[in-house]
């Protein structure tokens, strides 16, 4: 089973994936893109790589179908993971835009990149993209949670997906709404 762990930069994907790594196979999409050169160029304005989604898809399909037992869970972590075809579910990590701005400032992001990501979070951009790409999408708010609390929420979602149990309503898309943040800009 392939599950995408996605969210706007700064929501906690990499931190949660590092904790999940103890029990679950994790594919770090950003590292894979860099290591295997799965990009078409560099966006100089944003100072980021332009990912080649077709090549990424081919590579992910190869490494996930040839090496894993059918009943295993593979987490594909990265802010583009929700755009991959063939995922069984998507978990979107969310964070209040004001807190997200602080997290990105602490990482050394520039003002325009901070604003772009905070606005994307306020407008549910990744959540909407995930809903367009996958039938099973869940979200959880990392704003005031510790990494361990977020891990617990993600594990609860994964367990419910794997056992085909009803997912707690708090994780259903649309429960988190920061549109007021976008309106106040």
Image (tube, helix red, strand yellow):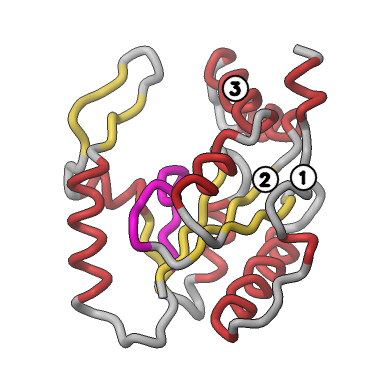
Indicate which label's residue lies in the foreground, 2 or 3: 2
- Do the residues under discs 3 and 1 have CB atoms within 8 angstroms? no
Residue at (57% x, 32% y) in the render: 107
User: Which of the two discs, 2 and 3, labels the residue nearer the N terminus?
Assistant: 2
Label 2 neighbour load within 10 Å: few <14, some 14-19, many 20+: many
Callout 3: SS:
helix
* Residue 172, quarter of the rendered image: bottom right
Residue holding disc 3:
114
Q: Residue 9 carries which label?
A: none
The residue mark sitting in front, 2 or 1, is: 1
How far apart marks 2 and 1 lie (CA) works out to 8 Å
Identify the mark nearer the N-term, 2 or 1: 2
Identify the mark nearer the N-term, 3 or 1.
Answer: 3
Q: Picture coordinates of residue 162 (x, y %)?
A: 54, 81
Report which quarter residue 20 is drawn in. Answer: bottom right
Query: Which secondary structure, mark 1?
Result: loop
Q: Quadrant of the C terminus?
A: top right
Measure how far apart labels 3 and 1 are at the Cα level: 20 Å
The boundaries of the magenta stretch are 75-86
Question: Mark 1 — residue?
Answer: 176
- Please indicate whether residue 137 sits to the left or right of residue 148 in the image: left
Relative placement, left or right, of 57 versus 127 is: left
Q: Which mark is residue 94?
A: 2
Q: Residue shown at 54%/48% (left/top)?
A: 131
Whole-percent x and y of residue 29?
A: 35, 52
163 shown above or below 92 = below
Residues at circles 2 and 1 in contact by the CB criterion of under 8 Å: yes
Which percent across, then down, holds residue 167?
70, 72
Image-based side of 37 in relation to 117, left or right? left
Horizontal and vertical percent position of residue 92: 59, 51
């Amino acid at each position: 089973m392939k599950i995408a762990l996605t969210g706007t930069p700064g929501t906690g994907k990499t931190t949660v994936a590092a904790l999940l790594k103890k029990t679950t196979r994790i594919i770090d999409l950003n590292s894979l893109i860099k290591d295997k050169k799965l990009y078409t160029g560099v966006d100089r304005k944003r100072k980021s790589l332009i990912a080649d989604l077709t090549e990424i898809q081919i590579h992910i399909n190869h490494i996930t179908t040839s090496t894993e037992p059918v009943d295993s869970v593979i987490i594909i972590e990265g802010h583009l993971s929700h755009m991959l075809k063939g995922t069984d579910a998507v978990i979107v990590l969310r964070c209040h835009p004001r807190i997200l701005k602080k997290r990105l400032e602490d990482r050394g992001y520039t003002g325009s990149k901070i604003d772009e990501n905070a606005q994307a979070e306020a407008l549910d951009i990744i959540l909407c993209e995930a809903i367009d790409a996958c039938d099973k999408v869940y979200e959880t708010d990392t704003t005031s949670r510790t990494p361990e609390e977020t891990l617990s929420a993600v594990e609860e979602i994964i367990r419910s997906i794997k056992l085909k149990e009803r997912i707690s309503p708090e994780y259903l898309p649309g429960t988190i709404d920061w549109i007021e943040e976008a309106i106040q800009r």
